[in-house]
Amino acid sequence: MPEGDSVYRLRGRLDAATRGAHVGDGELRSGNAAGRSLAGLAIDSYDTHGKHLLTRFDDGSTLHTHLRMQGSWTITRAGRSLPTAARGKARVRLRLLDGREVWGLDLPVVELVPTARESDVVGYLGPDPLREDWDAAEAVARLSVRPERTVVAALLDQTRIAGLGNLWVNEVAFLRGIHPLAPIGGTDVAALVATAARCLRVSATVPGMYQVTTGDRRTGASHWVVGRAGRPCLRCGTRVRVRDEVQNDPERRRTWWCPRCQPLADGTDVGTPE
């Protein structure tokens, strides 16, 4: 699943390519305004909050979209078209006056709302480290409300802190030396939030560091624990363990950790090395 840094980078690409462009014709093909023509509008700006993308038009409306597991955006050059199979997945189509087309493909969330009421669709989200209004103290306070929750469950809760997905939750827990299934109330929540925010910002803004947590961009060496079940920990050599976070989870989230670098306080451990 795309995480906050993924959507932030997507915003940058769309902004550089289409900000200020006028829509010759196009429409929404799903959501609360399915069938609505977007002809005549200009793309005013883009914004993100967590994993949510906000596309603002000059008529005072905002297109709110979410990629979830399967969604994507693509731009075709003038005179080029998408393959037929891909066109069938289009949920948003914008043909710009210069002939290029912007396609939102297989988007599970497509909502058109007044820009002044964006809070209706993203107001429930927690603070986002990639936004100018980032409030670390508020994130700490929200995460501390339920101290019995596991670290992984708390950090994945977008109402507590927005933008962290499964990859970052697991990698941040390793970097802090915290077992992902430990109660968050037993950790230094402020330090945890600071590490998470720093990692997300580096991934989103530093060239070549997208979702690289070890500093090593080589295949198989870019993550400390994610995707390394049964393989030696890059720090201590202990076999990395894994378990399903939620049984039959449609998002197929898993939890990884090194039992030596991230011990539980009571000395127990659960999971399987492969």
Image: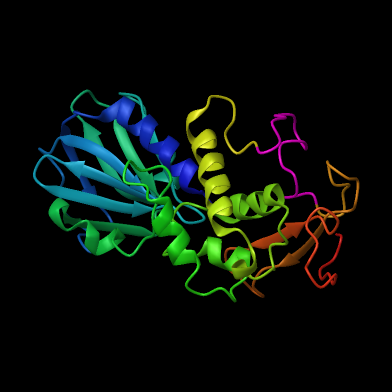
Residue 149 can be seen in this image: yes
- Place residue 273 in its image quadrant: bottom right
Q: Main secondary structure of the magenta part?
A: loop
Let me know if residue 121 is in the magenta part.
no
Task: Locate the C terminus and report the quarter of the image it occupies.
Answer: bottom right
As displayed, is residue 73 above or below residue 140?
above
The residue lying at 21 percent from left, 48 percent from top is: 27
Residue 46 point in image, percent of width and height:
27, 39
In this rendering, the answer to whether 54 lies above or below 251 is above
Where is residue 81? Give x, y as percent: 37, 33
Closer-to-camera residue (111/27): 111
Q: Position of residue 116 (x, y in %)?
A: 13, 54
Q: Is residue 91 above or below residue 152?
A: above
Whether residue 266 sits left or right of residue 176 in the image: it is: right
Q: Is residue 267 left or right of residue 96?
A: right
Residue occupying the point 78% across, 67% down:
264
Task: Tell me which corner region of the image, top left, top right, bottom left or bottom right, holds residue 158.
Answer: bottom left
Expressed as whole percent of the image width and height from the top left, the position of residue 171 reads 66, 49
**Magenta residue check for 227:** yes
Q: Nearer the viewer, residue 127 or 31?
A: 127
Residue 269: which quarter of the image? bottom right
Answer whether residue 106 is visible to the viewer in this image: no
Tell me the residue at 37%/51% (across/down).
135
Query: Which stretch appears magenta?
Result: 213-228
